[in-house]
Amino acid sequence: MEHVVIIGNGISGVTAARHIRKRSNKKITIISAESEYFFSRTALMYVYMGHMKFEHTKPYEDWFWSKNRIDIKNGFVETIETATKTLHFSDGETLQYDKLIIATGSKSNKFGWQGQNLKGVQGLYSKQDLENLEVHAPNNTICKRAVIVGGGLIGIELAEMLNSRNIPVTFLVRESSFWNSVLPDGESQMINRHIKNHHIDLRLSSNLKEIVSDEQGKVKSVIIEETGEEISCDFVGLAAGVSPNIDFIKESDIETNKGILVNRFLETNIPDVYAIGDCAEQREAIGNRKSIEAVWYTGRMMGEVVAQTICGHKIPYNPGHWFNSAKFFDIEYQTYGWVHGSKTKPDDEAHFHWKHEDNTKCITIAFNKNTNDFLGINTFGIRMRHEVFDKWLTEKRALDYVINHLPEANFDPEFYKHYEQGIQKAYKTQLQTV
Ligand SMILES: Cc1cc2nc3c(=O)[nH]c(=O)nc-3n(C[C@H](O)[C@H](O)[C@H](O)COP(=O)(O)OP(=O)(O)OC[C@H]3O[C@@H](n4cnc5c(N)ncnc54)[C@H](O)[C@@H]3O)c2cc1C
């Protein structure tokens, strides 16, 4: 019987395993060095914040795997010998495969800062990171101040987590406004204010120079590049992005760049070896999308696609329109299609922006200046329906159409009772002033 081995039990690997089982009787083994069973990485923050126990982050009961004849193996794969189709584990064990799916996810970036490996300095990615966070930042007696380096989605989650335990936080953000490499200015500035309203010491245009050690090899302070200021702290969260977790692949003959290079069928350069999820890099980016996408649903889609291919129904990965969602403290964010930040906005992209006076809700609609085609929307503090925007993007609707039909996309009917007129009025006013 053909043996499919999957390295990584995250959303990508587990989705592939489930779909291969649905479609075949193949022998399936999932390997992980992190946790015995699959858990939801996106829920880690809620464990620290006390909203759920780690046990509750597991989407499947422990019996699910044996019932579905999916073997679970705990261990770290050190090398892949593709000529003999053999995996070598760090404890000396080996395992043969017929087909291999690499789904090893990401790791937190470390840019060679002095002190980056001290005790009390870590990223937020794995179950072990969560455990270490409990050791070094359990409360504000042991951790009198935390410093977070990097103003992205993980940085702001970490700020919210530490804030929930009343640990004072200094947040170092390299950009001049929060996440303005991605967000348009109005939105980014709204989030700056929101972060400060949560009593976070937000330092914009601030880079980490070095992390200083005490006599026990534990962090005692950080130094800021621009000002030389030294900030005392007991914990440093490194949240300056993630990159594919593929160091162990570099020894093999599987071709890599930043990630493991794959074609549209998620095949690597080696027959019978596939890569999916955060660790995969498309040889040619698909449309406007990035060649590496470290988001949950991308991994899930790739898992489904590769399962079909492995089960004899070869199909290309076709992710459709970009969407994503996140949370900035209590403001929910959704994005559909493309809304570029001021630094990356193409010349023919224009924006209609509306913000509520309470400073917690806004929308930005991107459209083509020349054709008036709808390109994408960002919403903050307002929930919208994914399928509606997906349809409008496919149908290439005009901006006017989208504004006039916004109530159809609304997830929360109450919102439009209050704000619909405001948005449409603002739109008319802006049209007159353009
Ligand atoms: C704190 C946090 C919050 C997030 N929030 C969101 C969100 O709100 N929305 C969103 O879309 N995305 C979010 N993400 C990103 C999302 O979680 C990832 O895109 C997704 O989990 C990646 O899944 P994956 O299966 O590709 O890899 P992973 O989940 O990283 O799984 C890979 C597994 O492989 C194991 N592994 C790696 N190398 C080896 C080896 N050599 N041997 C054995 N095992 C190995 C790893 O230990 C890991 O368990 C968040 C990420 C983090 C860290």
Image (tube, rainbow, N blue to C red):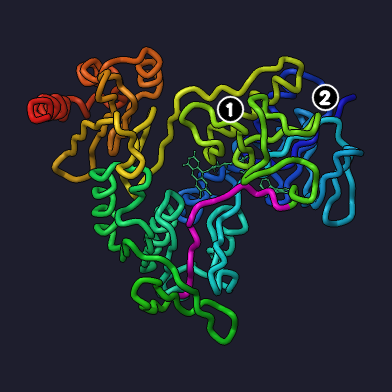
Is residue 150 positioned above or below 101 on the image? below
Counting from the top left corner in percent of width and height, residue 76 is at: 77, 52
Quadrant for ligand 1?
Answer: top right
Residue 261 shown left or right of residue 179 in the figure: right
Kindly indicate the quadrant of the structure image that contains residue 324.
Answer: top left
Distance of label 2 from label 1 (alpha carbons): 21 Å
Q: Which mark is residue 381?
A: none
Task: State the residue at coordinates (54%, 59%).
Answer: 123
Residue 123 shown left or right of residue 163 in the figure: right
From where the camera sits, is residue 407 visible?
Answer: no
Amino acid identity at mark 2: Lys
Task: State the residue at coordinates (25%, 31%).
Answer: 350
Q: Which residue is mark 2?
A: 26
Q: Residue furthest bottom?
A: 215
Q: Which residue is mark 1?
A: 301
Crowding near the residue tagged with mark 1, few <14, some 14–19, many ≥20 C-alpha atoms within 10 Å: some
Counting from the top left corner in percent of width and height, residue 297 is at: 53, 32
From where the camera sits, is residue 403 visible?
Answer: yes
Q: Which residues are magenta?
A: 233-247
Q: Nearer the viewer, residue 213 or 395?
A: 395
Residue 281 shown left or right of residue 411 in the figure: right
Question: Is residue 243 one of those drawn in magenta?
Answer: yes
Crowding near the residue tagged with mark 2, few <14, some 14–19, many ≥20 C-alpha atoms within 10 Å: some
